[in-house]
Image (tube, rainbow, N blue to C red):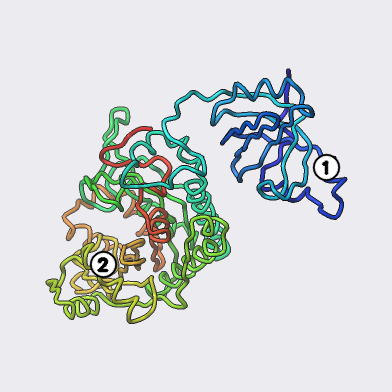
């Protein structure tokens, strides 16, 4: 029998057809709904299917003398997670979930699910336990995301990305797409994934850094992309991946790195507000706070605060994971904010494109910053070098060969405005917002152990 899905509705849309004042009209409303069988119940003369789609569940009610025998026979063959097509009448029932149910006039089994299931995605299943069964869940991600709470994470992720894109577009940023296959390191270093590219040496891109800077010379003024980074680092932590996504932005005609931080602050507030007001936050039972202002603390100030906690970092040393966490607690206690910037990093520990504080290669400080969220870095950025000779000198001082960056350096010979930018990790935002691990907020994580599915 030929069927069509064109008139289907989602379960959460059914409430739009319910009119308690006009019950008769509601009862005669024909509905087409499709989805997965979450549960079946058999009470002899009365049978139920709990049908789940992307937006929720709906109860399908079948009475022995009122439901066609053909449908009752099909129900006997149903297994959990089978896909079915149901056309029937909507009925108001105060005892039913959501206050309504569907009496089927037609049912087609689209696909029978094998049993036993590798994992139970029903609402009755225990909520995701990242310590006990994360590998089983990731191996069967197609089933895992049928869980209401897991699905909510990725719907929230979609909201975050959409809100970010809208904010950037409204602030005159142009969306771009930079190459993901490159001939040399974007930021120096050796943590690159080499690939076979005909008869040449090539790598997966660490970031769009060089290309977005080149576009500043092209007069685009403000650009962004929802970028993919590839980092060949052998991490084995709850916050690192080898393939990550980020909002990556660059902007021209800035007075200082503070202009860049202003944009990040506005972007993050927009994202947090979108998340705070979302249905997904309610499902995940998350209270999301939005600071009025993100404190901006210098590297030296952070060292001083850490020293008060009996932690000594030699000047020029890294503020490591432990110290970031402590600083997160300090800032929350002193300033009441879960987000804060660390500014004025030592120049010697920053990439070659980072602007020295006074645009002198011998400067002690840089115009670089990091953004921390609950004691975890979620963004790095700063003002860039826009002067050709200084940039070439910085490349040499970072023990890199300027010849390998000729295509990039050429853009600085013919009119480059002062500019700066940042990368803001999408997984990092979500993991900190939801107080979870990075593997929970990306569909198919890529790390040192996992290349499939």
Residue annotated with mark 1:
27
Residue annotated with mark 2:
324
Q: Quadrant of the C terminus?
A: top left
Above or below for 416 versus 225: below
Mark nearer the viewer, 2 or 1:
1
Residue depicted at x 22% and y 58%: 395
CA–CA distance in space, label 2 to label 1: 59 Å
Q: How many marks?
A: 2
- Viewer-proximal residue among 94 and 15: 94
Residue 376 in the image, given as x and y percentages of width and height: 31, 63
Residue 106 in the image, given as x and y percentages of width and height: 75, 27
- Viewer-proximal residue among 180 and 389: 180
Residue depicted at x 40% and y 53%: 427
Above or below for 227 versus 320: above
- Secondary-structure class at tag 1: helix
Q: Quadrant of the N terminus?
A: top right
Residue 304 in the image, given as x and y percentages of width and height: 20, 80
Above or below for 354 versus 439: below
Residue depicted at x 39% and y 78%: 336
Residue depicted at x 29% and y 64%: 354
Q: Residues within 10 Å of mark 2 (few under 14, many from 20)?
A: many
Residue at the extreme front: 44
- The circle on residue 66 is none
Q: Residues within 10 Å of mark 1 (few under 14, many from 20)?
A: some
């Amino acid at each position: 029998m030929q069927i069509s899905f064109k008139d289907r509705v989602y379960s959460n849309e059914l409430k739009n057809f319910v009119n308690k004042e006009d019950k008769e009209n509601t009862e005669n409303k024909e509905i087409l709904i499709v989805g997965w069988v979450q549960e079946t119940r058999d009470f002899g003369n009365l049978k139920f299917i709990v049908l789940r789609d992307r937006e929720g569940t709906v109860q399908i009610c079948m009475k022995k003398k009122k439901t066609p025998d053909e449908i009752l026979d099909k129900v006997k063959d149903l297994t959990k997670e089978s896909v079915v097509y149901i056309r029937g009448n909507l009925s108001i029932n105060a005892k039913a979930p959501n206050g309504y149910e569907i009496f089927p006039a037609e049912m087609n089994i689209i696909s029978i699910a094998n049993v036993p299931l590798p994992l139970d995605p029903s609402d009755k299943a225990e909520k995701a336990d990242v310590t006990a069964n994360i590998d089983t869940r990731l191996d069967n991600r197609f089933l895992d995301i049928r869980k209401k709470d897991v699905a909510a994470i990725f719907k929230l992720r979609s909201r975050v990305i959409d809100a970010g894109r809208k904010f950037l577009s409204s602030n005159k940023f142009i969306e771009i797409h930079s190459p993901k296959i490159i001939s040399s390191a974007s930021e120096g270093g050796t943590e690159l994934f080499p690939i076979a590219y005909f008869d040449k040496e090539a790598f997966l891109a660490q970031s769009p850094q060089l290309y977005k800077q080149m576009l500043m010379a092209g007069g685009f003024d403000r650009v962004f992309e929802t970028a993919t980074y590839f980092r060949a680092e052998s991490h084995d932590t709850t916050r690192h991946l080898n393939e990550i996504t980020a909002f990556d932005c660059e902007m021209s005609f800035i007075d200082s790195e503070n202009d860049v931080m202003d944009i990040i602050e506005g972007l993050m507030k927009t994202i947090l507000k979108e998340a705070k007001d979302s249905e997904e936050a309610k499902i995940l039972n998350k209270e999301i706070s939005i600071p009025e202002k993100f404190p901006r603390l210098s590297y030296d100030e952070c060292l001083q605060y850490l020293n008060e906690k009996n932690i000594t970092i030699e000047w020029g040393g890294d503020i490591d994971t432990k110290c970031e966490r402590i600083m997160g607690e300090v800032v929350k206690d002193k300033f009441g904010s879960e987000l804060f910037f660390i500014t004025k990093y030592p120049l010697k520990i920053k990439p070659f494109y980072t602007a020295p504080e006074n645009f002198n290669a011998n400067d002690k400080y840089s115009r670089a910053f990091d953004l921390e969220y609950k004691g975890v870095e979620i963004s790095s950025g700063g003002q860039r070098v826009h002067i050709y000779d200084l940039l070439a000198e910085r490349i040499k001082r970072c023990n890199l060969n300027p010849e390998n960056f000729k295509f990039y350096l050429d853009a600085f010979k013919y009119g480059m405005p002062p500019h700066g930018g940042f990368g803001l990790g999408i997984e990092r935002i979500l993991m900190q917002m939801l107080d979870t691990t990075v593997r929970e907020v990306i569909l198919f994580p890529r790390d040192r152990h996992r290349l499939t599915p």
